[in-house]
Image (cartoon, rainbow, N blue to C red):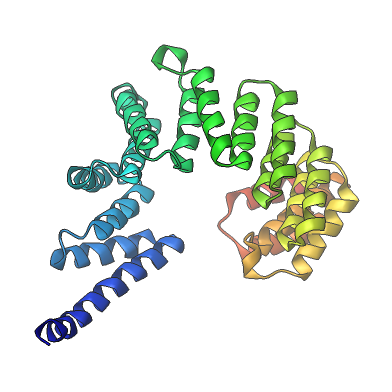
């Protein structure tokens, strides 16, 4: 009975704690890092040893690029549990982002980044995210500082053993980065055939754009649209048509469809669709229609510099 009464007394505190953590996780999903930071700071005043709260606070700092504050939290987590692969992964990722932002400090951080990622990979043989991080790290580092295509491919192989789709995408990334487009395209297509997720289609579309092959990019999006029926894909087709001055009729039709069926879940504001339509009409020498659409874009998002620059180009046609 005494233990039962103790549970009843503690339950409101435990429930409150869980609700605070759940709220922080919700704020994280909504990318509201400022409120998340404040919530966890207040929570940790009463629960200073709560590891999940410390981790969430570190995440909030990291996504705001407050590297020194994030480092303190992730380092504390490692002091408590240095066998936790995810703590090593987050610590290494934070240092890596800090290194990218400040090239003068990069040399002093790279060693810690590599050791943290490798420790995470060793501790958790199923950790997909850290293997992706190692694939990218070894491809982007100059050879003088330990960069190695061979090591990158090693972790891509480990990824493939865990997830064929991730392995194929990783190899596509490696060969694209190494300027082997034929092999890159092959692996991106293998990822689509294996998994067929929107992410796989997006990777191949980005590859075609990087290779200046907009027609192939549009065709790939159309295949994805047949499978997923997502309104956002209409915008992507219109965007490529407008940027590369190809398939203008198809691009215009897709953008009009996007505007007709638009909901906030589609992600890209309607103003950008009007901007793309203005580009298309400018390519077609339809000055009046181009002005109509760029004015609608500016009316919706008046602070976007790109829209104002586009209007100047149209006016000077």
Q: Nearer the viewer, residue 180 or 167?
A: 167
Q: Nearer the viewer, residue 245 or 89?
A: 89
Q: Is residue 122 above or below residue 181?
A: below
At which x and y percent is residue 64?
36, 50
The residue under the point 90% across, 52% down is 249
Left or right of residue 245: residue 6: left
Is residue 317 among what the camera can see? no
Q: For the N terminus, which image quadrant?
A: bottom left
The residue under the point 21% across, 67% down is 43
Q: Is residue 208 above or below residue 226?
A: above
Find the residue positioned furthest to the top. 144
Q: For the C terminus, which image quadrant?
A: top right
- How many marks the image carries: the answer is 0
Left or right of residue 27: residue 18: left
Report which quarter residue 214 is drawn in.
top right
The residue under the point 82% across, 38% down is 216
Q: Nearer the viewer, residue 234 or 13?
A: 13
Q: Is residue 211 above or below residue 125?
A: above
Report which quarter residue 95 is drawn in.
top left
At which x and y percent is residue 286?
87, 52
Q: Nearer the viewer, residue 25 or 211?
A: 25
At which x and y percent is residue 48?
15, 60
Is residue 6 among what the camera can see? yes
Q: Is residue 46 above or below residue 310?
A: below
The residue under the point 40% across, 61% down is 28
Find the residue positioned furthest to the left. 2
At which x and y percent is residue 105?
30, 26
Left or right of residue 279: residue 22: left
């Amino acid at each position: 009975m005494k233990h039962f009464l103790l549970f009843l007394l503690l339950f409101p505190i435990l429930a409150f704690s869980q609700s605070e953590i759940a709220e922080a996780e919700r704020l994280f999903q909504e990318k509201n890092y400022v409120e998340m930071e404040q919530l966890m700071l207040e929570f940790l005043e009463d629960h200073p040893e709560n590891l999940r709260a410390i981790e969430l606070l570190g995440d909030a700092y990291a996504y705001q690029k407050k590297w020194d504050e994030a480092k303190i939290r992730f380092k504390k987590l490692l002091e408590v549990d240095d066998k936790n692969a995810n703590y090593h992964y987050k610590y290494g990722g934070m240092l890596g982002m800090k290194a990218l932002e400040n090239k003068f400090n990069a040399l002093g951080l790279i060693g810690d980044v590599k050791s943290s990622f490798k420790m995470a990979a060793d501790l958790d043989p199923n950790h997909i995210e850290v293997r992706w991080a190692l694939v990218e790290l070894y491809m982007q580092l100059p050879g003088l500082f330990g960069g190695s295509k061979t090591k990158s491919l090693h972790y891509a192989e480990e990824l493939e053993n865990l997830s064929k789709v991730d392995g194929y995408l990783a190899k596509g990334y490696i060969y694209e980065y190494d300027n082997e487009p034929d092999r890159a395209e092959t692996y991106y297509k293998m990822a689509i055939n294996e998994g067929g997720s929107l992410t796989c289609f997006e990777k191949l579309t980005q590859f075609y754009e990087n290779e200046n092959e907009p027609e192939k990019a549009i065709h790939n999006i159309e295949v994805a649209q047949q499978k997923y029926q997502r309104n956002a894909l209409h915008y992507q087709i219109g965007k490529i048509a407008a940027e590369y001055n190809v398939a203008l009729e198809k691009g215009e039709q897709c953008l009009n469809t996007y505007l007709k069926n638009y909901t906030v879940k589609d992600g890209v504001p309607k103003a950008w669709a009007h901007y793309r339509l203005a580009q298309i009409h400018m390519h077609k020498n339809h000055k009046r229609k181009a002005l109509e659409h760029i004015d609608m874009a500016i009316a919706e998002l008046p602070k976007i510099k790109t829209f104002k620059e586009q209007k100047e180009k149209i006016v000077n046609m």
